[in-house]
Amino acid sequence: MTNVELAVQFFLQIAVILLTCRVVGMIAVRFGQPQVVAEMIAGVCLGPSLLGLFWPEFHASLFPWDSNTRDTQSYLFPAAQLGLALYMFVVGMEFRIDIVRSQWKSAVAVSVAGMVVPFLMGLGLGWYFFRYTELFPKGTALFDVSLFLGASMCITAFPMLARIIHHKRLTGTRMGTVAIGAGALDDASAWCLLAVVLSSLDKNSAGAWKNIGGGLAFVAVAMLILRPLLLRTQRWLTSDQQLSDVGLVVCLVLMSFAAFVTDAIGLHAVFGAFVVGAVIPRGIITRDAVARIQPLTVALLLPLFFTFSGLNTRIGLLDSGRLWLLCGLVLGVAILGKGVACWLAARATGIPNREAMGVGILMNARGMMELIIINIGRERGLISDELFAMLVIMAVVTTLMTSPVFDRLVGQQPASSAATR
């Protein structure tokens, strides 16, 4: 295809994607599901698992497949990556570690349990898959794939968790505070773990340490140099108590350059976008930057990422009872390792059973963060298309079940759970 043909096709893809996401969203809201869950489902529906299954010719013309790159031939991938980076930049600007201070003990306990238990179970699952299945591509190392699967099991959908807590009016309650604090710590730890996995892929210990050192140096520069510099110059980025156009451009340049740097040193671009967002001075800059970046990112660019993930998900590859049993095993390990472990950890720190169960249910949601990490694994050749499909199903199911299971088992938030302020 020529660039002009790709551009024309890209606009058609956007129209179909946005329309599908909104239609699925109208259905999902009737079941108490947020729009972001609908977009996850819509992405899978637009892929070979549904649209390609019933209308293969239309699907092939709308999303042509390149067998060499294992991706669609369009501008969908770079646009999806831009949306992902912008969204993680917004998440970084909204990241608040101070929220865990009122429930520090419980938040840390839940965070540790929600990392250690699913990680160890993921390691065991990785070993089993490596030894007795062909779910990992040939040439991959046991250490790399096990570590990756462990990391993918302990991720929490921190951005989605924040939305669910707000939607259910749990903000400021003990349950909401513990869950959001533990989720923040879990995601930060999971990104560090993912960095180790990506750094080890070159099978060169010196290169791996170089990548890890580069990541630590990047964080240090962002915290010790960039943040103080922005604090001193923030008055030049605002005008009349608002973020100026120049200030917005500076924020976007910093985000883009940070994404470039972390990608260049062997980490993922979203890591740099998140870190820079976290060091942007709170106040006028973050308030207005989020207000100006988030709407277009959430409404236009993020659905492209979900669709791109769906296009790479071929549930039809799970064409045997054994593969579906393995998929069920993945789902069972995910729920037991994350939800149950976090519930028990919350109980162990003195939280009443009903609230502790709510914390475990909330922490079990994977959402978009899971899709990010498994897309990275697929891009780097760590997992097969079959295992990718299993992990997408796990991400969708654990996210879908959060709201209805919470309403069923926890219900109305008890008044006694109000957090201290």
Image (spheres, rainbow, N blue to C red):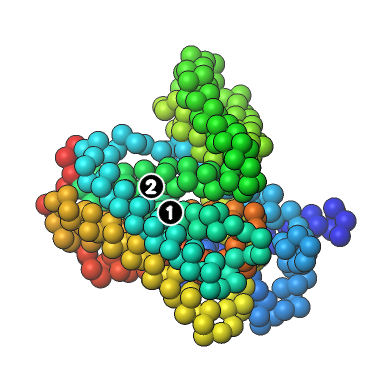
Residue position for label 2: 186
Q: Nearer the viewer, residue 370 or 94?
A: 370
Q: What residue type is labelled 1?
A: Ile
**Residue drawn at 53 percent across, 73 percent down:** 132
Q: Are marks 2 and 1 in contact (CB under 8 Å)?
A: yes
**Residue drawn at 47 percent across, 17 percent down:** 228
Q: How crowded is mark 2: few (under 14 residues within 10 Å), some or many (20 or more)?
A: many
Q: What residue type is labelled 2?
A: Asp
Q: From what the image shows, is residue 170 above or below residue 122?
A: above
The C terminus sits in image quarter? top left
**Residue drawn at 41 percent across, 38 percent down:** 95
Residue 136: % across, % down: 60, 65
Residue position for label 1: 155
Q: From what the image shows, is residue 331 above or below residue 368?
A: below
Residue 318: % across, % down: 57, 78
Q: From what the image shows, is residue 169 above or below residue 184?
A: below
Of all residues shown, which one is farthest toward the right?
Answer: 2
Is residue 19 visible to us here?
no
Residue 165: % across, % down: 32, 52
Picture quadrant of residue 366: bottom left
Give the left or right position of residue 321, taking residue 17 as reference. Answer: left
Instruction: Tell me the SS state at disc 1.
Output: loop
